[in-house]
Amino acid sequence: MVEVIRGWRGLPASQRGAAVAVGAFDGVHRGHQAVIASAREAAQRLGAPLGVVSFDPHPRRLFQPDAAPFRLMTPDQMARALAPLGVDRLYLIPFDAEMAGMTDEAFARRVLSEGLGIAHAAVGFDFTFGKGRSGSPALLRTYGETLGFTVSVTDRIDDASGLKLSSSAVREALKAGDMDRAAAILGRPYAIQGEVIHGDKRGRTIGVPTANIAMGDYMRPAYGVYATRTRLQDGRVVKGVANLGVRPMFEIEQPLLEVWLLDFNESLYGQTIETELVAFLRGEMKFDGLDELKVQIEADASAARAVLG
């Protein structure tokens, strides 16, 4: 279980002194995992806990408040993705106006050294920090020598097949509906987590009740129908078929993930569930009526079962 620590001021000694990987880590993809592995080596060498330092909200939300939704995961998903990597602590640093205005030296001194008391910082080759992104890995190493922590820098790594391992590459794959490529970069299927909300109940009228999740700040993958696996709040995993989008037939305003859990008939309202988008089956379509829609949904369910096995 990863301990989630929000903030960097006034931490007790028991929450300080870790060897940390520092970065946004949105997606915790295989490139991020290489940086975390470098921090893990340092933690073992120094006999220190292993930590990850990230930011919430993502810095882009402050600098580009009107930008389209872009997040790949929630902080809760990040903590769960970090657990198998041996991470002990996730430090979520509030990214606010004060943080955005900090010089690179102030971030290294006030946040990493004085606040978190780090023993080591592992960063990626393209890591920047401080106001105007003025800080570099080389500069962080210089600050570390003065402030008493060591620094390791992970070179860019790409898959042997030439697959680019980056958050932007994940987003490109998701927009293209290429779930295999997204999963290859992430090291696991892409998943959306959220609370089950009340929809218009239209699916129930044709025998297809769905669990509806608002997309919120998640980036928008290709709109259409997916084969899915959903992890329920109690840990059960249920196969399904989902529509992600605005349903052109009904013209809903905000995109929803609507998951029809196959061979399942329980109420999930108010529960938090996580749905893996395993395979993209087809794009969104407009239908002449509910009967035509129901026929297509049954075909989608058959296709999903074939994919999921």
Image (spheres, rainbow, N blue to C red):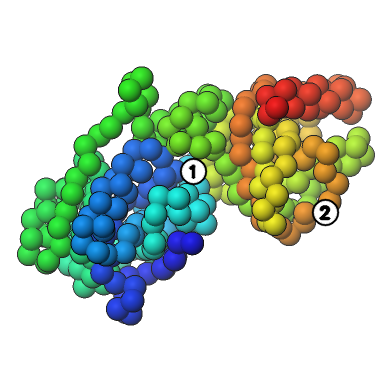
| Residue carrying label 1 | 72
Distance, label 1 to label 2, CA atoms, is 27 Å
Q: Earlier in the sequence, mark 1 or mark 2?
A: 1
Residue 84: image location, x then y, percent: 45, 50
**282 to 26, vertically: above or below:** above
Can residue 285 be seen here? The reply is no
**56 to 249, vertically: above or below:** below
Q: Secondary structure at mark 2?
A: loop
**195 to 14, vertically: above or below:** above
- At x 29%, y 53%, the residue is 40
Q: In which quadrant of the rendered view does residue 109 lie?
A: bottom left
- At x 20%, y 68%, the residue is 113
Specify the amino acid type for callout 1.
Answer: Leu
The residue nearer to you, when weighing 309 against 145, is 309
The tally of labels here is 2
Q: Secondary structure at mark 1?
A: loop
